Image: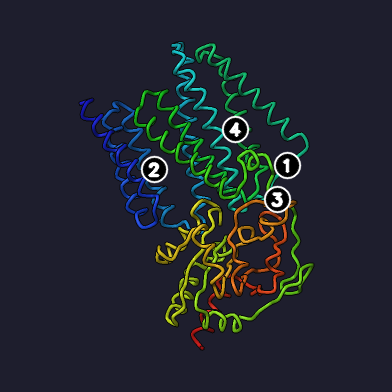
Amino acid sequence: MSVALSLVNLVAVALFIYGLHQLNSPPTARAGNRLAMVGMAIALVSTLLQTQGIGWWAILVGVILGGTIGIVAALRVKMTAMPQMVALYNGAGGGAAALISTLEFFVLASGNGENAVVSVSLVLSAIIGCLSFAGSIIAFLKLQELMTGRPITYPGQQVVNAVILLAILGLAGWFIATLGTMPVLAFLGLLLCSLLLGILFVLPIGGADMPVVISLLNSFTGLAVAVTGFEINSPLLIICGALVGASGTLLTVMMGKAMNRPLTNVLFGAFGSGGGSEPAAGSGGPQQIRSASADDVAIMLAYASKVIFVPGYGMAVAQAQHSVKALGDQLEKRGVKVLYAIHPVAGRMPGHMNVLLAESNVPYEQLLDMDDANPEFPTTDVALVIGANDVTNPAARNVKSSPIYGMPILDVDKATNVIVLKRSMRSGFAGIDNPLYEMPNTSMLFGDAKASVDALTAAVKAL
């Protein structure tokens, strides 16, 4: 029976690996997701078959409850809220690892000491799981705007974090030295310190860095799960956790590279701490800007040869992705070449814009990543920027004092005409002004993104 179950687990792992590989490309992502789902179902059945007594029923109840919550969430959560849901699910994984470690600790506390490997695995799983859980909850609150998305800093912040980290290391050393037989209150103190560090770890990180933070927390959860596998002797958990941890780490590195910022700067730089003013829409404020009407912009779009849409978080907030697709369809009927330029960190999680546009059935071949999109802008008649702020800011190229200096951006300013759709002149999450709005080839179309795009579609139809 054990050999058969090992083979079943091997099939599940193979499906996980191949499904993850399929996620590399938008056209195969759905198939990859389905393969991973099948692998998870096989893994759950295998786990049930290996469990006897009350454990069998406990796992079955957990599967039913978790599956129900997952189905309800999938049906009700809007695509624009996907980053928040990812943060919650990521936190759930870290919390589960911490709970398993807590349960194992109480087994050890009953009087049966364990070996050093299990003790090290247990304490690492507890610490990393708690950190991931607490950090993910704060990320969720920021993304859901239940708390400010700006960095929250205070005097002596790094000192406080260092003291808590030292306390965690000291308690962890005590735990390992005693092979898990330390007092219960000391272990609970270790958990509380880990939770507190997770909270303080994410509080000073601004919304502009949230894609990087989500990737990093995802890698933490994977690492916690993998270590838990050593703790309870589960090769399946070890392999799956390692996959998640490795992919999360690679994605974190890629996100940092896309922003041209080291990870330490993301975690400790309090990016986005600037206040940013909000002049009245169309009033000019401190910047010399030009405002355009929907009819004027529609004429530019209708008689263009090539138009590039540049989506950002503003499109997600306004839920304008379907309207953008409708406008693109109208332009294509008039013979206009339509493309979509996607910045790696546009939105609130990696691939956020790709997910929204895929939901609207935008053809994958029209979605260009930054490296492919930038050579297209010099020959583009109109670049339509929809709520993308910091990822189109030319200050990243030429203003050394800017907090985003050196970050690769979409070169929308090189298009013949740039139309920016915004509610107001408020700055993005980086808290800085965007000189793009003052350029002579740029015009602003103020208002809700969805309403503005719908107005453009109607005006193009009327021509």
Determine the secondary structure under disc 2.
helix
- N-term mark: 1 or 2: 2
Q: How far apart are labels 3 and 1 at the CA level?
A: 17 Å
Q: Earlier in the sequence, mark 4 or mark 1?
A: 1
Q: Nearer the viewer, residue 297 or 451?
A: 297
Q: Is residue 461 above or below residue 412?
A: below
Residue at 42% of width from left, 67% of height from top? 362
Q: Which residue is mark 4?
A: 195
Q: Residue at x 45, y 22 (%)?
A: 104
Quarter of the image where one finds residue 166: top right
User: Label 2, on which residue?
Assistant: 65
Please, is residue 330 above or below residue 34 in the view? below
Q: Nearer the viewer, mark 3 or mark 1?
A: 3
Instruction: Give the label on residue 403, or none.
Output: 3
Residue 457: where, in percent of width, then height? 51, 79
Front tag of 3 and 4: 3
Which of labels 2 and 3 is toward the front?
A: 3
- Residue drawn at x 45%, y 40% as measured from the top left: 247
Q: Position of residue 346 (x, y in %)?
A: 56, 56
Tag 1: amino acid: Thr
Q: Position of residue 153 (x, y in %)?
A: 73, 42
